[in-house]
Structures are given as C-alpha cells and as structure tokens.
Image (cartoon, rainbow, N blue to C red):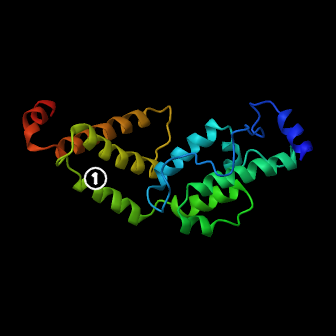
Amino acid sequence: MSVSNSNSSSIDSSNPLYLHPSDHPGMILVSKQFDGSGFGSWKRAMSIALSVKNKFGFVDGTITNSINPSLWSRCNEMVISWIINTLSRDISESVLYVQSAAQLWKELNDRYGQANGAKYYQLQKSLCEISQGNSSIAAYFTKIKSIWDEFGSLSAVPACSCGYYAQFSKKEDEQRLIQFLMGLNSAYENVRGSIL
C-alpha cells in the first residue's frame, strides 16, 4: 500500500493519473441521477465534472493503461464508481461488471445516446406543446431551452468555413424565437407583435 501511495504522491496534480486525497469511490460528481431519461443533459454534466477532475480521458479512451498500469487501474476504477454513483439502481446494476470507464461510457452512449425517431418525435411534440402557462418568463425560457439543447445534441451540425453553418444557425435562432413567442401568454400579445 505504501508503494502505491508513494507512486500517487509523486505524480504531479495535473497528471490524469493523480487522485486528490479527497477523491473517493462514493463521491457523487453530478446532482442529477440518470434514470434513463434526459441522457444528453446528464452526459454533458458528467463530462464537465470529469473534465474538471482531469479524468475525461478515461471515458473517451485517450488515457490508456500503458503508462502506469497499476495507477491507471486505480483511477479507472474510481471513474467507474463516480459514474455508477450517478445512475439509477436498475441502470447501475446492468453495467456493474464493465472493465473500463471507456467501456462503460460507450455502453451508456450506445444504449441511451442514439438518436432515433421516437426521441425526435417526443422532443418535437414537447416543443409544439410547451407554453408559458403559470410559469414566469424565465422559467418558461428555461424549460424550452432545455428541449432545444437536447434536440441540438441529437442533431448537431458541424461548423464549417463555407458560410452554411452561419446561415443555418441564423435560421435556427429565428425558428427558436418564433417557438418562444408562440408559447407566451396572451398578456404579451403587444410585445409579441412588436418583436415580429
């Protein structure tokens, strides 16, 4: 045990194989537990948390066990435990025996991150049905923006230098403005007319 502690303490804190003394397997990196819905937002939150911990390379496969197998294994297991801690019981039990964080990440992506017709349908339906109702404008905007963000993560258009991306982005912004205005309460009729 003292060998691994001395190896770990001799590693620079910017090294992805470094574990801070406060890092432990029971740590929960994101507050939202993933239960099978909202994969895009959970994945984004988890990616940010792992990047902050300098451990995202374990899930994207860029950090391999060829550098220092024992320290890699220790960090890999820590990352697996952090991810599993944010999964619902049913999902965590189905991925408990994966061997690497990259394998776990890929399995979750394959299972929940695939865009399909049903998901597109559900998001489009949500956009068509959303309205301000009793919510404040800020709360309404937050709800509609989360749907836009999830939809955008499923159908991202890569940026290019030809100018098409800028045109596409402008059209998308115009469409989102119209969707937002359509859902506002009738009390904002004059404001809606002025903007249009």
Mark 1 neighbour density, 10 Å: few (under 14) some (14–19) many (20 or more): many
Above/below status of 118 relative to 167: below
Q: Answer with the quarter of the image where residue 49 lies.
A: top right
Task: Give the farthest residue toward the right.
Answer: 3
Q: Answer with the quarter of the image where residue 109 lies.
A: bottom right
Q: Answer with the quarter of the image where residue 20 lies.
A: top right
Image x and y of residue 100, in percent: 73, 57
Task: State left or right for residue 48 relative to residue 69.
Answer: left
Q: Nearer the viewer, residue 132 or 194?
A: 132
Task: State left or right for residue 132 relative to residue 188.
Answer: right
Image x and y of residue 36, in percent: 48, 62
Residue depicted at 16% across the width and 43% down the height: 184
Look at the image and tell me in which quarter the C terminus lies.
Answer: top left
Q: How many marks?
A: 1
Residue depicted at 80% across the width and 52% down the height: 73
Residue marked by disc 1: 127
Task: State left or right for residue 100 relative to residue 151.
Answer: right
Residue depicted at 46% across the width and 44% down the height: 157
Q: Nearer the viewer, residue 35 or 57?
A: 35
What's under tag 1, amino acid-wise? Leu
Residue depicted at 68% across the width and 51% down the height: 25
Image x and y of residue 62, in percent: 73, 45
Q: Secondary structure at mark 1?
A: helix
Image x and y of residue 172, in percent: 33, 41
Q: Nearer the viewer, residue 30 or 175?
A: 30
